[in-house]
Image (cartoon, rainbow, N blue to C red):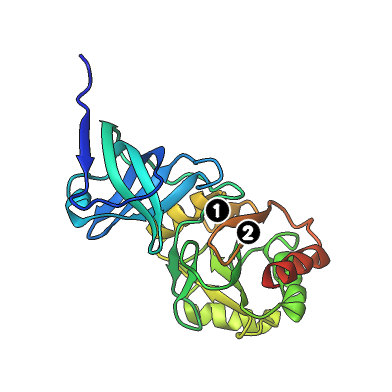
Amino acid sequence: MTPLIALLVACNFYGGETHSTQGVVLEAGGTAVVLQHEGVADVLEPGQGSFIVDPNLARQVKPGDVVQANLMNTEEGMRAIGFRVTGHEPVGKARIVEIGQPFPKYVLPSLQGDKVVGVGQQGTVVLTFLFTSCPLPAFCPLLSFKLAKVQESLPPDTQIIAVTLDPANDSLEVLRGYGQEKGADPEKWTFARLEQAQLEELLTYAGVTREQQEKDILHNLRTLVINPKGELVWTASDNEWSEAELSELLNKLAD
């Protein structure tokens, strides 16, 4: 049977050049629709993005709708002026973000108040993951040592955020003591904590694997740099990166 195809357009008309992309609706409501979308050459990088819409249009689509979207770049931002619904699929689990793609926006409860990473953030973020009772010197302890070196030359509007992999045991107070022990300057480097369900989603986006084994946590290493536009621009999957290399990148992003 031929699938039903619906054409949805906004009530208002906007003049100007339009662009077409395909995507899956992740969120819809008010005056915005969030899509996991394909790219448009010289206009839009593939990834996850929020688009301005007429409220009537937002009410006509739902999460999981597969759409052909008509887009227009306006003074307000990228606007979706019409959707062609071609199918529906369950909204899948989070997928790892690749270099150049927008990193989903997360508000992270931290020692210095809520910190924001991803789309819509301000400044550059070095995002990484560890836990205070990690028993392997070459993993979390070495990562903390290297981050302490990086913070010495951290440029303005740049922050280091380390998210605990062990929210059951690492309260914010425990993280505060750990930060003091590792020489973390709270103006430059903070520690954050998410509840388990939201943490697991963030770990998937970041490419971090985590497995609870009785009293231990098995995990890989992953350090990311997210630029002021909310795009992932650098990753390291071990502790082999040099402090000088990362510091040079952060200073370039701050220029």
Evaluate whether residue 80 shows in this view: yes
Separation (CA) of disc 1 from disc 2: 8 Å
x, y percentage for residue 8?
21, 40
x, y percentage for residue 102?
51, 54
Task: For mark 2, give the secondary structure.
Answer: strand
Residue 175: numbered disc: none
Tell me if label 1 and label 2 are in contact, CB under 8 Å: yes
Residue 206: numbered disc: 1
Closest to the observer, 97 or 78: 78
At x 55%, y 53%, the residue is: 206
Evaluate whether residue 132 shows in this view: no
Question: Mark 2 is on which residue type?
Answer: Leu
Question: Mark 1 is on which residue type?
Answer: Ala
x, y percentage for residue 133?
60, 68
Q: Is residue 78 above or below residue 247?
A: above
Closest to the observer, 139 or 148: 148
Relative side of 226 to 255, left or right: left
Task: For mark 1, give the secondary structure.
Answer: helix
- Please tell me how crowded label 1 is: few (under 14), some (14-19), or many (20+) other residues with Cα within 10 Å: many
Q: Is residue 218 above or below residue 126?
A: above
Residue at numbered disc 2: 224
Q: Is residue 253 above or below residue 26?
A: below
Quadrant of the drawing holding the C terminus: bottom right
Relative side of 74 to 220, left or right: left
First in sequence: mark 1 vs mark 2: 1
Location of residue 84 (image quadrant): top left
